[in-house]
Amino acid sequence: MSVIVIGNRAVGKTSMIVALAKGTKNVQVIQPNANSLIERFSNPKTGELAGTFEVKDPISLSLSINLSSRKGQEFEVRWIDTPGEYWSNPKTRETNPKEWKKLIETVRNSKSVVLLLPPYLYRSRSVELKEGEEPEELDPQTWKTQLKNWLAFLRKNCPKVQHLLITIHKADLFSNNLDEDEQNWQYDPDQLFRWSDYDNHIRKTYFDLAYDIIREHNSQPPYISPQFFVTTIHKPNLLELPWVYLGSHLAHDYNF
Ligand SMILES: Nc1nc2c(ncn2[C@@H]2O[C@H](COP(=O)(O)OP(=O)(O)OP(=O)(O)O)[C@@H](O)[C@H]2O)c(=O)[nH]1
Ligand SMILES: [Mg+2]
């Protein structure tokens, strides 16, 4: 399966895969190992995670996911990390038209898309964020407009998408308290996980302000209704849910 990850600059796309590679309760990256991924994405001079500026080739990952149908179900995943600069800054598209075309082509052919959004109300600023790295804090209205634009973009450019996952990432910075969600929504392969209840809960708690936009989106072709998440690299139980969700559906779709 191929999974493409999109979202504005510094929203946390690359960090998400690096954090996942460290392993969670139900998702293990078998190959490549976490250290080699970290090295690959880091600035060799500072050792810190570097921003992604080029349209890169997909990374092949071997994942093992505990599903209720089978523990340790293995998947080969082509992970496509994208440079946020192209999404955040339209000028980049004009100065690198070939790269932009390549990116759009990849999006068009993707069946699984993960869109990362920033939180719209911060609890506090993270010490991890460096000067100039984070766009201005989003007020709810601007956040809504961005979501609306993303959904219009996806409707236009993702005719083949079967799984659209939208997550508010860096949710540890969000004004809501996540501890309860982390407690209540742990995936346990031995118990039934009600994805639609989880989706309803996340929608109501975090996406309610965009209710009208989401409803309008769902009523328009090609009718790709998203599954909603909140994630943060600091809470592995929440971070793994999009991958367990994809695993459960893809195992079913492709009849593993
Ligand atoms: N507080 C917090 N910070 C995070 C989280 N995920 C990523 N970050 C920080 O956000 C910054 C940007 O992360 P990246 O993974 O480089 O973001 P990106 O979306 O890949 O950015 P581009 O490659 O420029 O498009 C880094 O300083 C990360 O440490 C998170 O869940 N919580
Ligand atoms: Mg990146």
Image: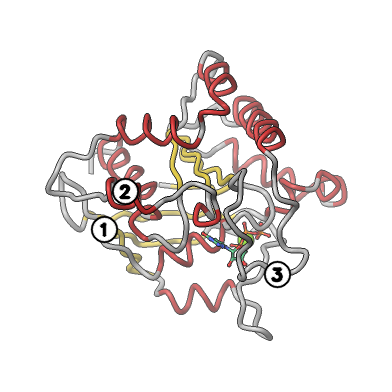
Of badges 2 and 3, nearer the viewer stands 3
Can you identify the residue that label 1 sits on?
A: 26
Crowd tier of the residue under label 3, counting other residues whose Cα lies within 10 Å: few below 14, some 14–19, many 20 or above: few
Which percent across, then down, holds residue 40?
56, 74
**Nearer the N terminus, badge 2 or badge 3?**
3
Q: Secondary structure at mark 3?
A: loop
- How many numbered discs, if any? 3
As shown in the figure, which amino acid type bears the numbered disc 2?
Val
Q: Residue extending furthest bottom?
A: 45
**The label number, if any, that marks residue 244 in the structure image:** 2
Q: Are marks 1 and 2 in contact (CB under 8 Å)?
A: yes
As displayed, is residue 223 above or below residue 249? above
Measure the alpha-carbon separation of dots 2 and 3.
Answer: 31 Å
Can you identify the residue that label 3 sits on?
A: 130
**The label number, if any, that marks residue 66 in the structure image:** none
For label 3, being within 8 Å of ligand 1 is answered: yes
Q: Secondary structure at mark 1?
A: loop
Residue that appears at 69% across and 46% down: 102
